[in-house]
Amino acid sequence: MIEGVKIRKLRPIPDERGYLMEMLRSDWEEFEKFGQVYVTAAYPGVVKAWHYHRLQTDHFICLQGMAKVVLYDGREDSPTYRQIEEFFIGHLNPLLIKIPPLVMHGFKGLGPGMTLIVNVPTELYNYQEPDEYRLPPDTDQIPYDWARKDR
């Protein structure tokens, strides 16, 4: 696992009315502080990558559909420098992924419908000076191919 990344298996609690699922609690070890909550959507096959934050920690949860979330550790001083992690999250695998600052990340919408990712970052979005640094999905700085892998 990339240094500082944490995952937690989420537990849907179903009953005859539907289900309830806690996504992030302040008494969980993954919680640091609250900045805001937002949802990001991707159409099938769309890749939203790469980006990182210098200050912000992200907490990703896939609420609808499935997503391939990919992390890349570009931190030269990290014991997991240049390591890549893939997670397939969503209704078939409900996970919380904690993504620390400076870890590049992105996701791809999988399946026939729209994918919805909820993020609970530790910082408010700063409209004047965003803590957002980007590279294109096909950058040669990250050794990763977003194409489907038929094994």
Image (spheres, helix red, strand yellow):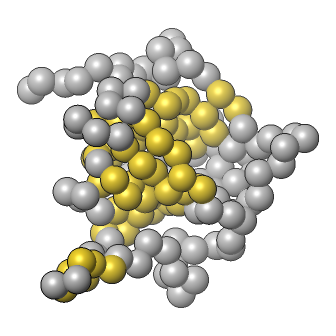
Q: Is residue 144 left or right of residue 55?
A: left
Q: Is residue 63 above or below residue 107?
A: below
Q: Residue at x 68, y 63 (%)?
A: 36
Image: 146 above or below 71: above
**Rendered location of residue 24, percent (x, y):** 49, 74
Residue at image location 22% in from the left, 83% down from the top? 17
Q: Residue furthest left?
A: 151
Residue 83 can be seen, yes or no:
no
**Residue nearer the viewer, 80 or 30:** 30
On the picture, is 44 further left or further right than 127?
A: left
Residue 32 is situated, as x and y percent measured from the top left of the image, at 64, 73
**Residue 119, image x, y percentages:** 55, 56
Q: Quadrant of residue 13?
A: bottom left
Front-most of 140 and 124? Answer: 124
Q: Is residue 93 left or right of residue 10?
A: left
Look at the image and tell me in which quarter the C terminus lies.
top left
Give the residue displayed 90% in from the left and 41% down from the top.
Answer: 128
Which residue is depicted at the point 51% across and 81% down?
A: 25
**At which x and y percent is residue 89?**
30, 52
Which residue ends up furthest to the right in the rendered image? 128
